[in-house]
Image (cartoon, rainbow, N blue to C red):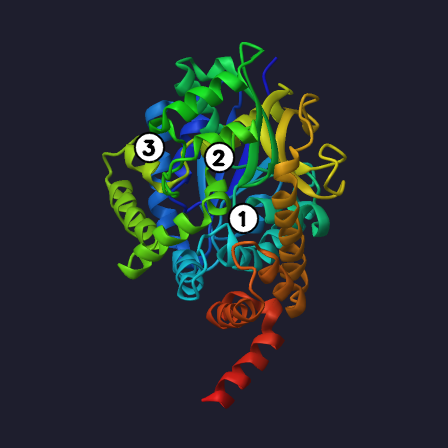
Amino acid sequence: MSKKPLKIVTIGGGSSYTPELVEGLIKRYDEMPVSDYWLVDIEEGKEKLEIVGALAKRMVEKAGVPMNIHLTLDRREALKDADFVTTQLRVGLLDARVKDERIPLSYGFLGQETNGAGGLFKALRTVPVILDIAKDMSELCPDAWLINFTNPAGIVTEALLRYGVHKKVVGVCNVPIGMEFGFADALGVDKERITVDFAGLNHMVYAERVYLDGRDVTSQLIDILTNNNSKSQTMANIAALDWDPATIKAFGVLPCPYHRYYYKKQEMLNHELEEFKNGKTRAEVVKEVEKRLFELYKNPELKDKPEELSRRGGAHYSDVACNVINGIYNDKNTIIAVNTRNNGTLKQFEDASAIEVSCYVGKNGPVPVETVTDLPIFAQGLAGQIKAFERLAAEAAYTGDYNTALAAMVTNPLVADDKKGRKLLNEMLLAHKDYLPQFKKVIDVLEKVERAEF
């Protein structure tokens, strides 16, 4: 029996990540017959959309699959009767990310696009846009699943679950799958033989247990990784600072690369301050990588995803997103770590909260695997503080309430300073005012105060 052809929409289609998705859809065409793939962007992203769209068409033509690529700036046109919608947008583009990193560093705080003050402001800019997309979906494609890759994915998923009108939502991240590849490499086996019980929050997920052919090899893997720090796992966008072997053994679980911002806070801050002093934060590096990528994408002879894309920091993203779509579409019950509603899985969090956890992904969406257990005691305090931050950030983004935003800023452990935190909040509200309409009244007051001071 032939399968129903799929209509998939990617919002933020002009992203440099899109060739990853196109490659993933082509590889899985026999299982997921995508007849129409829509790439959507905004006016400011039109040029990039056209460049990426042309590459996507060349990739599809080379592969010989009957997938129609559509480009549009009209989101509602694209969403009509979609089966799946993926989101990978950046409100304010990379210039906003530069501010998210440089302004906190000027106060002596870590600047990072998903953690600390930078993560807060990316959420404040992004959540209202994602909620609007969810509202459109509830009207134009109510049965479609929203697969969100937009960072900070944990806060975005939290906001969608609490304030969104469209509830068929899955948050995805490439951190867990990157860890799986690293574990397989350390054990010298194919990744397909590895399964992992992940539990925690987005960019704060722990590998509780690692299985090789169904056998628990967590202790063995910890020994391998702590005895050979050359295998220290990280990502293209995070400094590869080695973990302290005794501490990882004391944990008894494996942290994710982003935990370096908390367990190696001073070292990470020193590293970023050095980059800041030399005038080049990660955001500015990414801008250079993007520029080179789009020059490659323009080449009419290029018909494959270029290897250089791996330097962008989103390796394996397409595998996660496409595996989620495949799991739902074909009711595969594939085990994938995703962001989803807690529903009692981790007892320290409310049922309504978003968590990142290993799930069976089938036709009804993600269902946490039964072997996942509560976080170890040592992790619960930090995870609880980050969840409080996520809750406050999602609420502030939705309501535009200054006090909630201030509470979120100061609650974050990478800030945790009342006076400097408030000054930082005010400066960043002014710096991002064009993308924070929900804070207009607050920003108007701040501008009057600023003018009065000068």
**Which residue is at 44% across, 19% downward?**
184
Residue type for callout 3? Lys
The residue where tag 1 is placed is 152
Which one is earlier in the sequence, the residue at label 1 or at label 2? 1
The residue where tag 3 is placed is 305
**Taking 198 as reference, is 313 left or right?**
left
Instruction: Please identify the quadrant where the N terminus is shown.
Output: top right
Answer whether residue 66 is visible to the viewer in this image.
no
Is 149 placed above or below 177 here? below
Give the CA distance from mark 1 to mark 2: 13 Å
Instruction: Please identify the quadrant where the C terminus is shown.
Output: bottom left
Query: For the residue carrying disc 2, how many other residues have a C-alpha within 10 Å: few (<14), some (14-19), or many (20+)?
Result: many
The secondary element bearing badge 1 is classed as: loop
**Taking 298 as reference, is 6 left or right?**
right
Marking on residue 175: 2
In front of the other: 327 or 238: 238
Is 141 placed above or below 229 here? below
Q: Position of residue 189 (x, y in %)?
A: 42, 13
Of all residues, the one furthest to the front in this rendering is 246
Instruction: Tally the numbered discs.
Output: 3
Give the CA distance from mark 3 to mark 1: 25 Å
The secondary element bearing badge 2 is classed as: helix
Where is residue 334, by image quadrant? Answer: top right
